Image: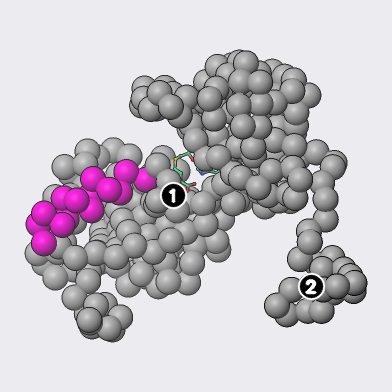
Amino acid sequence: PINRRQRQMCIRDSFVGAGPGAPDLITRRGAALLADADCIIYAGSLVNPALLGLAKPGCAIYNSAEMTLEQVLDTIRAAEKAGETTVRLHTGDPCLYGAIREQMDALDADGIPYDDTPGVSSFCGAAAALCAEYTLPNVSQTVIITRMEGRTPVPEAEQLEKLAAHGATMVIFLSIGLVDKVRQALLESGGYRPDTPAAVVYKATWPEQKVVRCTVSTLAEETRKNGITKTALIVVGDFLGENYERSKLYDPAFTTEFRQGTEAGQ
Ligand code: SAH
């Protein structure tokens, strides 16, 4: 196996997670790759352009929002051929709704090596904006990340109403424009009450971040009232409520591998 340094010597193409918005929420590795890049192709509809300030002078910068997959690939291929490094900069973490698979498969077919640097996904940025924990004991131990079906279809078994029936913590991407349908699906699922807490987080971690706390029932109305039409996540669940059990891990009675608890017989 080749080591990281050898790999760095032959890998010139990097997929990089930009983080949710605030430019200091990119990873140090991502920032170093950006600073070193000869070519940056960034997802301009969502990536904070402030991150482009890390680029070195003379770096070629492309906004993929205005490009097709073919144009993106041709740009990467041309840079590769010239022996130049490329960063393909995706918002949040590239693994969620990043359309990276089709790029990676094409690069594989061309024999162009690449690597992937994770980023802070917006669902984590939204939790931070809410100062919330998605996984509370006795409330929910599951986070469902999904979207409402729109122009992009969602498999039948994953329709929002079916997933919502679990009543788990849900983070709904790419769906703020369909908030009425989201509300209806959540209510009809039986997984949540009309007064189950919900929130809309607009541009989490950006300077213009907005947090709207509401309920499943008032979700659509509050979204409209606040003029939020894009770049937002809908989060739903009783993790936003008042009740939960404290964790066993830090309970004085509970024995773990690292700490003797007070409970008899442990
Ligand atoms: N890979 C990204 C998601 C890309 S899909 C990630 O990990 O976050 C684009 C959707 O992500 C948007 O429609 C919106 O729902 C959500 N999104 C991205 N950045 C956001 C932010 N800063 N605040 C709230 N939602 C965001």
| Viewer-side residue, 131 vs 28 | 131
Q: The magenta stretch spans which residues?
A: 98-111
- Residue 191 vertical placement versus 260 (above, below): above
Q: Is residue 172 visible?
A: yes
Q: Residue at x 66, y 26 (%)?
A: 191
The image position of residue 208, as x and y in percent, is 63, 43
Report the coloring of the rendering.
one colour
Residue 177 inside the magenta-drawn segment: no
- Disc tally is 2
Residue 103 inside the magenta-drawn segment: yes
The image position of residue 260, as x and y in percent, is 82, 79
Which residue matches tag 2? 255
Horizontal side, residue 4 vs residue 165: left or right = left
Query: Quadrant location of the N terminus?
Result: bottom left
Q: Is mark 1 within 8 Å of ligand 1?
A: yes
Which residue matches tag 1? 91
The image position of residue 122, as x and y in percent, is 54, 48
Q: CA distance from mark 2 to mark 1?
A: 41 Å
Amino acid carrying label 2: it is Thr
Q: Earlier in the sequence, mark 2 or mark 1?
A: 1
The image position of residue 179, as x and y in percent, is 57, 21
Query: Quadrant location of the C terminus?
Result: bottom right
- Residue 239 vertical placement versus 266 (above, below): above
Q: Residues within 10 Å of mark 2 (few under 14, many from 20)?
A: some
